[in-house]
Amino acid sequence: MKFFKFTCLFGLSLSVLLALLPLSALATNILANSGLNDPYLDIPGRTWNGQAEKIASGWQPFYIAAGTYDASNNAKKLHWMSSVQFALSFGGIDYHIEGNRAQNMWSSYEFDAGIYQQISGVTPGQGYGFDMPIVTYWRGPGYPDSDGKMFKQVGIDPTGGTNPTSSNIIWSSTNANDKTWVYMDVAATAQASTITVFARVQAPENDSFNHVDLDMVYFDAAHVAPVPATTLAAAINGTAVTLNWSGSGVAPAWSLKGYEVQYRDQASSTWTTIQSKNSTNTSGGFTGQLGRTYLVRARTWQQINESYQSGIDMPGDWREQTVTLGALVNGRVTTNRGDGVSGVTVSEAGSGASTTTGGDGSFSLGLSGAGNYTFTVGAVGGWSAPPPVQASLQLTSTPFLSFTLRPPDNVVGNGDFENDLAGWQVSGAPPATVANGRRSGSASLRLDDTSSISQSGLISNSYQPVLSFWYKVEGGDGNDSFTAHLFGSDGVTPANSFSTAANSDWQQVWLPLNLAEVYTGPASVEFSLAQGGEPQAAVYLDEVSLGASWGGPNDTYLPVIFK
């Protein structure tokens, strides 16, 4: 948007200007009465002080009830006039930029209002720009400049609707500079053979004594024209993003001004400018962060010189792309009860890339590209880490990894089955440790026949001891049962149990012993699979631990645990 001030203006009448312009130039402004010049027409049902209010031919007035005083009574404190009608009514000057008139709108009360025009015969799929200078006067020209009071905005409804509150309208950003002509502009791609352009001003209650100070608006010298199409291409090399852009289809009588290019992190709402509209360079770039996704956009600007103002510019519509730098993995680090742990270091073994869990134990880690990676977590507060987890990362998807820390008093030996079945008692067909389909480390246990494994230990002064394990079930028909039992002091009656016959991906289960808040005594665990006929399920088991819950009556563990 461009700012400028006028104290006295002279210009040719609209009819003389049209006679001097070639047809190719006429075709570049497809508005009717773009200069908002005579003739002005009576607005049905609207009068002020005995005279009809006026609207420039080709245009229509509007107000938005939610932001306009006395809207239920036809907003009778809001008025539209020609610039000369307003000057004669209040003893001012006939204020305009070009031609012989400008559209005036005024009130001493709150309003959200403006003017609009429907334009037929446009080409669906073609971009169109709308540009109009607007000046506002908070409490009149004699009152000091009051930026931030009256907000100007222009918009395009690409479907041709006339409702100023429609969600279809593409609005420009707002501008609240007072007593200064501001060129407001916006662009949109037509979705029908008719589009509608809106010029809008919002003004609050001005609080003048007896409402004698007027909030004034002038609209003038608008342009609507086809705008150039922009192409945008992105190339990624590690953290470097190289962009190339171009524009085509500058409207007749207009010339290329430049290309505006921006980017932002998808998680942020703030755009960073790579190149302003004043440059015609066609390439550039930025350096981002691995694992982050960015939005990039570019648009082409065209400009025209008029007798009353040179360098009037108009934007094309934005062309956007999404780029992801490298691969991203998300995940969470928890205790044996599934509570998140903050402040844990998560690392990728090969690259050394690392991050720290936050809030609820969650983390995100970016890598340089797609591939197979190995991830580890650090120990914290006396709790030990599980074996490394391997994952295949793609640029088009983000895997989620879960890590369960082990309690300091874990009494299960070889719970990760890295040493085959050492430390476990087996009944029935011996299960096998497998690398394919494993959850972590180098192996998981696979039970595929009726069998069971068990292990016993002695727990000493353990705070709310918990059995934790990960499992998944494949190929079951609902008749096969996988069961986990946790036994206490008698070793006969389970203190807690879990059973399922449903197929599932890897899931964590935790079973509290529930015998005492602080328990000392024997404890044992048993896992079994009972096959119910063909087809037979296969159960994978990994990361078995039995030990205290985080915290305790006399202990404080840092970092903080979040549910």
Image (cartoon, grey):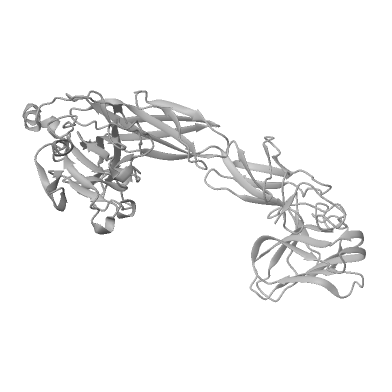
* Vertical arrangement, residue 378 with respect to residue 517, above or below: above
Query: Residue 285 appears at what percent x and percent y?
Result: 46, 28
Spot occupied by residue 478 in the image (x, y as percentages of width and height):
65, 74
**Could you say which quadrant of the image residue 19 lies in?**
top left
Tell whether 17 sits left or right of 284. Answer: left
- The one nearer the camera, 266 or 64, is 64
Of residue 204 and residue 199, the one placed in the foreground of this image is: 204
* Picture coordinates of residue 150, whole percent (x, y): 34, 40
Q: Residue at x 19, y 24 (%)?
A: 8
The C terminus is located in which quarter?
bottom right
Up/down of 377 relative to 248, above or below:
below
Residue sitting at x 42%, y 39%: 321
Count of residue discs: 0
The quadrant the N terminus occupies is: top left
| Left/right of residue 135 with respect to residue 319 in the rendered view | left
Q: Is residue 209 above or below residue 485?
A: above
Is 409 positioned to the left or the right of 44 in the image?
right
Q: Is residue 450 visible?
A: no
Residue found at the very far front of the displayed protein: 210
Q: From where the camera sits, is residue 1 visible?
A: yes
- Horizontal side of 474 relative to 551 (left or right) equals left
**Residue 53 position within the rendered picture, expressed as x and y whole percent measured from the top left:** 15, 47
